[in-house]
Image (spheres, helix red, strand yellow):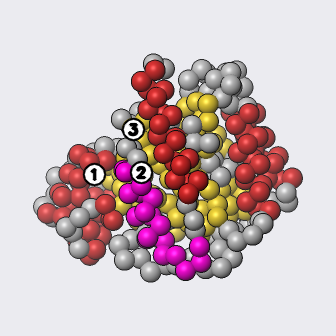
Amino acid sequence: MDAKIFDNYTKAGKILKDIFGALLVRPGDKIVDIADTVENEILRKGGVPAFPANISINEIAAHYTPVPNDEITIREGDLVKVDLGAHIGGYIADAAVTFCSGKNDMVIAVENAVKAAMKLMVPGKKVKDVSEAIESEIESKGFRAVSNLTGHSLDKFIFHGPVPIPNVRNSINYEFKVDDVFAVEPFATDGVGAVKDSERVYIFSYLKDHNTRLPESRQVLSLAKKDFSSLPFCERWIKGITPLKFDLGVKQLVAAGALQPYPVLREAGRGLVAQAEHTVIVRDKPVITTA
């Protein structure tokens, strides 16, 4: 990894570190205001959002981003997972924090899990070693790791790379190499330990071109390809299209295989979910870009 790439990764990580260091999530806050604020702050600090801000509450584990004029507000006692991505020149930082009122053992479990995992992100260690550390920390607090959500490798403009880091024990023998970049992402629950797709989809990414007669579909696809490359986007980022026409356009494009949908993920047993996440560059002394 040359110095410029390393610099971009670490600058992107510092942007998220600074945002999370100042972020307050309080009862009564509208989640659309939180999302707009953090996304604008990424831009103000010299980065670009790598995906729409995910603000997932209680049993919702991931992939909820507010729609325009979203009326959802934070309530006292909510477990609020804020998952942010920033990139500089395509080099991505990905981090998440769970906010809650007062002490919460599930939040402590995922925070301990990500700390334990980070120590193992060194050359020669294997994915299965990290996964075992994550699950052990979560189980030690009496919770279940979410089995079908994983950490993931990162690369230039590649948000979910080909190498996963499951949060449960496995036999993946991939050995970490110097300058591999990974997002390590423990999820814990008091539910059944798995998530399932809901019918709601608010996040999409470009897959391929598609000829369509619907003007709104052409506009959405053009912006998805030109402005966001292969990275995810949402309705809030597409200006000048009504919600109805946006919905019609993306449904047509998803059906044609031109857009990748990211359904909102809900814990299968309706259990609560907590999340912690950091981005790390693998070295003898791991470089945690977001901490």
Position of residue 243 measured from the top left corner of the image (x, y, whole percent): 28, 74
Alpha carbon distance from label 2 to label 3: 10 Å
Alpha carbon distance from label 1 to label 2: 19 Å
Which residues lie in the magenta part?
26-44
Residue at the spot of label 2? 42
Identity, as a three-letter code, of the amino acid under mark 3: Ile
Of residue 163 and residue 3, the one placed in the foreground of this image is 3
Secondary structure beneath dot 2 equals helix
Residue at the spot of label 3? 88
User: Residue, x 48% and y 71% (percent of image)?
Assistant: 31
Image: 15 above or below 154: below
User: Is 20 on the left or on the right of 207, as rendered?
Assistant: right
User: Residue, x 73% and y 60% (percent of image)?
Assistant: 107
Alpha carbon distance from label 3 to label 1: 18 Å
Report whether residue 269 is seen: no
Task: From the image, state whether disc 3 or disc 1 is nearer to you.
Answer: 3
Of residue 44 and residue 226, the one placed in the foreground of this image is 44
User: Residue, x 52% and y 68% (percent of image)?
Assistant: 198
Report whether residue 276 is seen: yes
Residue at the spot of label 1? 224
Identity, as a three-letter code, of the amino acid under mark 2: Ile
